[in-house]
Amino acid sequence: MTTKTAPKTQLTQEGYDEIVRELKELEEVKLPEVVKRVETARGYGDLSENAEYHSAKEDQELTETRISELQAILQNAVIVSSSNKTATIGIGCTVTVSIKRGKAVKKQTFIIVGEFEADPNAGKISSASPIGIALTGKKKGDSVKVETPAGVVEYTIVDVK
């Protein structure tokens, strides 16, 4: 009989540390606050029409669900080193690309991260995103084309750190 193991979640050290921080905050601060709100609201009487109680219970369920999600991520986490002697793009690499859309060309720098760390506004692109998939395994000087909702975009790799 074979047992199925959950797939490993690749994270940078920074991403792992951020998840640990969030989990600690939820377990040590938010959950106790929410439990206290539930207990306080329970004292207000009839639970069937007690909006504060129902709101607090919903917050408790959401918090407990998030705690479970984070625990599962950490349990299956593999920290990927950002040391990159081969200059091949992978998780943890800082990549500078030249982006060509039609005749317009611009440069952009971002970090390839695990899917749970992605934050495009902070310049963190998921390795599981279309751009991340296209760039993974490539080297400085390579070009890739990525299908986006706005059409095909060409990325030329200018630098990999």
Image (spheres, helix red, strand yellow):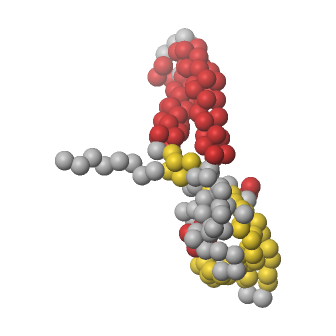
Of residues 30 and 39, the one drawn nearer to the viewer in this rendering: 30
The x, y position of residue 77, in whole percent, is 51, 45
**Residue placed most toward the observer, 21 or 45:** 21
- Note whether 72 is above or below 34 in the view shown: below
In the current view of this chain or complex, which residue is farthest to the bottom?
103
Q: Residue 23's x, y, as percent?
A: 59, 33
One can see residue 104 in this view:
yes
Q: Position of residue 40 (x, y in %)?
A: 58, 14
Q: Which residue appears farthest toward the left when viewing the image?
A: 1
Q: Give the residue drawn at x 66%, y 81%.
A: 143
**Which residue lies at the image location 64% right of the left edge and 40% below the top edge?**
17
For the image shown, how many numbered marks are present on the structure?
0
The reply, left or right, for residue 108 in relation to residue 127 is right
Q: Is residue 118 visible?
A: no
Look at the picture and state if 3 lies above or below 140: above
| Image position of 116 with respect to 37: above or below | below
Give the residue displayed 62% in from the left and 80% down from the top. Answer: 144
> Is the C terminus in the top left, top right, bottom left or bottom right quadrant?
bottom right
Q: Which residue is situated farthest in the front direction here?
A: 85
147, above or below 72, in the image: below
- Residue at (61% x, 78% y) in the render: 146
Q: Position of residue 141 (x, y in %)?
A: 70, 80
Is residue 91 rendered to the left or right of residue 6?
A: right
Picture quadrant where residue 20 is located: top right
Q: Is residue 11 left or right of residue 124?
A: left
